[in-house]
Amino acid sequence: MFSKIAVAAAALLALPLTTTPASAQETRAVPLPLAAGIDLLPTADESREGYQRTSFKHWVDADKDSCNTRAEVLIAESRIEPTIEPGCKVTTGEWYSYYDGVTVTTPGGLDIDHMVPLAEAWDSGASAWTAQRREAYANDLDADRSLVAVTARTNRSKADQDPAQWLPPLADARCTYAADWVATKLRWQLTVDEQERQALVAIAAGCGQQPVEYEPAP
């Protein structure tokens, strides 16, 4: 006679094997070569009709810890322990602006750049989103590539341009920038126009094994 343990074990073995759902597999960050990531981006014409910056509510305090999105990025990206005054006012730290290779120690010289600018996101598919999804995009702290602290000068030079129109002045930053751009567009299922695609392909040709890593946004 089988023991109770043996019977239970036999019952477990008889159960069908389960696998991880495809949807769960798809949310894992898997590195891709930059060229392969570009190939995944759908091509579509862009339209800025109806765009207003206020369509994207940004710099919110989503987790109610007194630190808004700008402060959260400054705290996360400082290379040293930042000084934070009451009300989550970040006053000192050390930040490396990878667009131009400049180190900054006071946050007043920094902008928090949306890797894919809000206007470009609108052009590329966000115009069809709900207000809640646009807010989530504008305050995306769950992906390191979505928001980046850079010198105000380079951010304002970039404005709302895509890689066909603007690239970081530091040449060594351009492969990383292209990968971050592609990762952000893939994460949020945004499109590229033909000129943008051609520019990204041209950059990727000189980037060797530069990887792209992303997880789809919720």
Image (cartoon, rainbow, N blue to C red):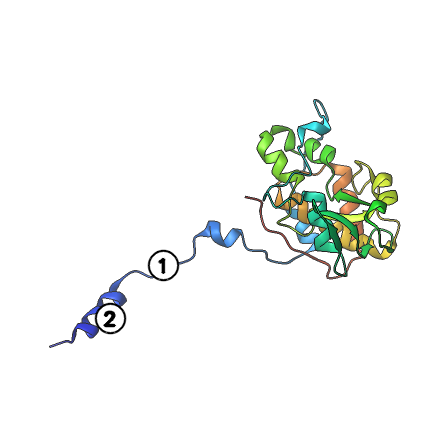
> Which amino acid, mark 1?
Thr
Q: What numbered label is drawn on residue 18? A: 1
Disc 1 crowd rating (10 Å Cα; few below 14, some 14-19, many 20+) is few
The residues bearing labels 2 and 1 have C-alpha atoms spaced at a distance of 17 Å
**Residue at (61%, 49%) from the top-left corner?**
142
**Residue at (65%, 55%) from the top-left corner?**
213
Residue 152, given in percent of the width and then of the height, sits at 85, 43
Residue 29, given in percent of the width and then of the height, sits at 59, 56
Q: Nearer the viewer, residue 85 or 188?
A: 85
The total number of labels drawn is 2
Q: Quadrant of residue 34?
A: bottom right
Quadrant containing the C terminus is top right
Residue 140, given in percent of the width and then of the height, sits at 64, 44
Q: Quadrant of residue 17?
A: bottom left
Q: To which residue does mark 2 refer? A: 9
Q: Residue furthest left?
A: 1
Quadrant containing the N terminus is bottom left
Q: Is residue 210 shown above or below 183?
A: below
